[in-house]
Amino acid sequence: MAIGATDRKPVRWHIGVFLLPAALVYSAIMIIPLAATLYQAFFSKSWSFVGLQNFETLFTDPRLSASFWNALRNNTWFFIIHMLVQNPIGILLAALLSNPRLRLRGFYRTVFFVPTILSFVIVGFVWKLILSPTWGVSQGMLKSAGLGWLFQPWLGKEEYALTALSLISVWQFIGIPMMLIYAALLSIPDEVIEAAECDGITGWSQFWKIQLPLVLPAIGICSVLTFVGNFNAFDLVYAAQGAAAGPNYSTDLLGTLLYRTFFGYQLQLGDRAMGSTIAAVMFLIILTGVCIYLFLVQTRLRRYQF
Amino acid sequence: MTLHRKLMLATAFAALAAGAGSAFAQDVTLTIESWRTDDLTVWQDTLIPAFEAANPGIKVVFSPTAPTEYNAALNSKLDGGTAGDLITCRPFDASLDLFKAGRLAPLNDLPGMANFSDVAKSAWTTDDGATTFCVPMAAVIHGYIYNKDAFEQLGIEEPKTEAEFFAALDKIKADGTYIPLAMGTNDQWEAATMGYNNIGPNYWKGEEGRLALIAGTQKLTDEQWVAPYRQLAKWKDYLGDGFEAQTYSDSQNLFTLGRAAIYPAGSWEISGFNANATFGMGAFPPPVQNAGDTCYISDHTDIGIGMNAKTPHPGEARKFLDWVASAEFAGLFANALPGFFALSSAPVTLEDPLAQEFLSWRGECESTIRSTYAILSRGTPNLENDTWNASVQVIKGAETPEDAGARLQAGLDSWYKPGAM
């Protein structure tokens, strides 16, 4: 018995103690508000339990559902532009940066990454000025290249505003996929590359057949980060177009719709029940997207890893 | 030793301070809650000294909170019983809710209330018109500010009628030196506030139409409510290139830099324009349809002041409110803040010529407030916010005036039942 007692590992209290501060802070500022928001979605404005009625209103009320579907559609387009533009360009930049013959690599890396650390407010304001038909430089630059006829007040036209904003966001966040994929490319062992060269696989076919499959997990991570970031997006639209997400709600994302509904806007009073409902739906959308990635995509990607 | 001396000094100061405090103990101090942080110096240097000089024994402290936090901060102070004696009132529903909750005292029997018209009081009166709970303090007036040099150069007179207005715009456009109208649709609210609600009162005959809309006897699909959209649709050709992405501050800068001839304005622009523009400026009210028609202006109530129902000094607070209702206050306030006009019916002369021009329209035209602010923006969809959107769509040509009217009326009908409120 005495031997057994000495063999038993002592309870490792310090693990719990070390985790506690982070767990407390995280619960206080993330988990509890999130749970409270989800909880509130089941109550009316006057705090009586209404079950799923808020969700029913959101999806059936002709005006609210029109705003919601419009925001979701815009949000999806926002995401598609990011996937089609941000990730391929990120991969391309990473591939160029990892080219051993490239000079001034550190300089380029920094330059491409700098917009990512800028505040949304600065990015929104600067781009608004650049694209401004009144003072902006874009019109003059296009004219000097003989392309003056291409100029449009992009941010003010319903058909272009959302795409223009998406591209501004791509410009801002291009550094993140670039860095993640660059790191993944650097971590490919030289032996693999050398073996490929021995087999006569060089240049572009080496990139397509060896490097790209090996960085697919990093691309997957980028995609899921982009997905979460895009469906939570709010700041850039708010900074560039205001909470009314003009022109004619063409840049309205779920985030701006949530803001207007929850906090109210101008003379419109805030509705915390409906706001929480929209927040809950956003949470579900993001949760579904992340689950699809985790259970369907990532399990397959594992096969390429060492 | 040094510590000992410091302690003694502190004690001496404390005794002095206590003595000074007791010397003024009979004075009553009134605290004003406000969101007008910008006006702090005006209150401290001009308004409060004038009142204190005339009313010895009453001290007034102006204690503003940031505009975005004001409503929430005021509500929690009122709940906690720590709010000031005098409350600066937001127009319409925010203050009406406070009155209904018993936070603001009724002021019907305040003698100074006689100095105000019903329009001036409308923002702080119950829906049935029976009780007024804040003294109207300031309003902003809408119209057009123009570049005098441009008008002289092109030989244009201030337009009196709509036909003259568009003839002037055509002339400016043909000349090409100036952008005829400095307004953009990027920020949306200008199209409704400086567009629709600026020109509209001439069509719907000011208060008559506004009240009929609330009573349900007129609809937004009626001619007098659609016609302003028809005029707005014509504005498109006179706005600057790329007006779709032109922001509010772009428009202000275009005008003050002398690149635009006419600016659809609110009077709050006056002090900013005076500081930035290097040319002479004039102003004219929204032109009427036919020469000789009665003109109507949007004279929109913006700031009021009421009394905390739980104030320990109701007598002194009422004295102050009565002074706010006086002609003396009206003159001091409007001169200190050109562009914010006191609402009192007492005649006031302003030193700023542009502000005086705006103010003079009160004598020539009938005043009204923005049609969407009272009662009609209580529900969802919100009529004011929808009007922003509709005005922009109409200016861009993306929606016909008739469709815009029908859409707004349908939105209003979905929650507003005339007479039920």
Image (cartoon, coloured by chain):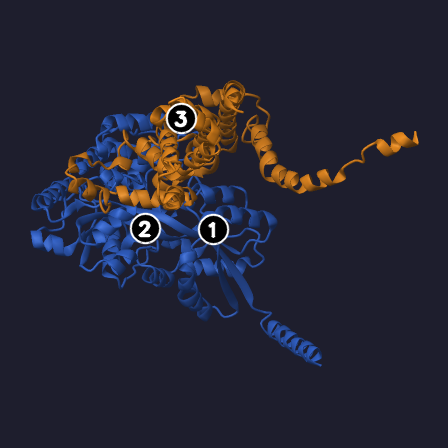
| Residue most extreme to the right | A1
Does the image show residue B421? no
The chain coloured blue in the image: B
Q: Is residue B181 left or right of residue A177?
A: left
Q: Which mark is residue A197?
A: 3
The quarter of the picture where residue B51 lies is bottom left
- Establish if B288 lies above or below A184: below
User: What chain does mark 1 sit on?
Assistant: B
**Residue beneath disc 2:** B140
Q: In the rendered image of this protein, does residue B37 appear above or below residue B167?
A: below
Mark 3: give few (<14), some (14-19) or many (20+) Cα within 10 Å. few
Quadrant of residue B205 in the image? Answer: top left
Is label 3 on the same chain as label 1? no
Tag 3 subunit:
A
Q: Secondary structure at mark 1?
A: loop
Amino acid carrying label 3: it is Glu
Q: Quadrant of the C terminus of chain A?
A: top right
Task: Identify which residue, B45 or B114, lies in the foreground.
Answer: B45
Q: Secondary structure at mark 3?
A: helix
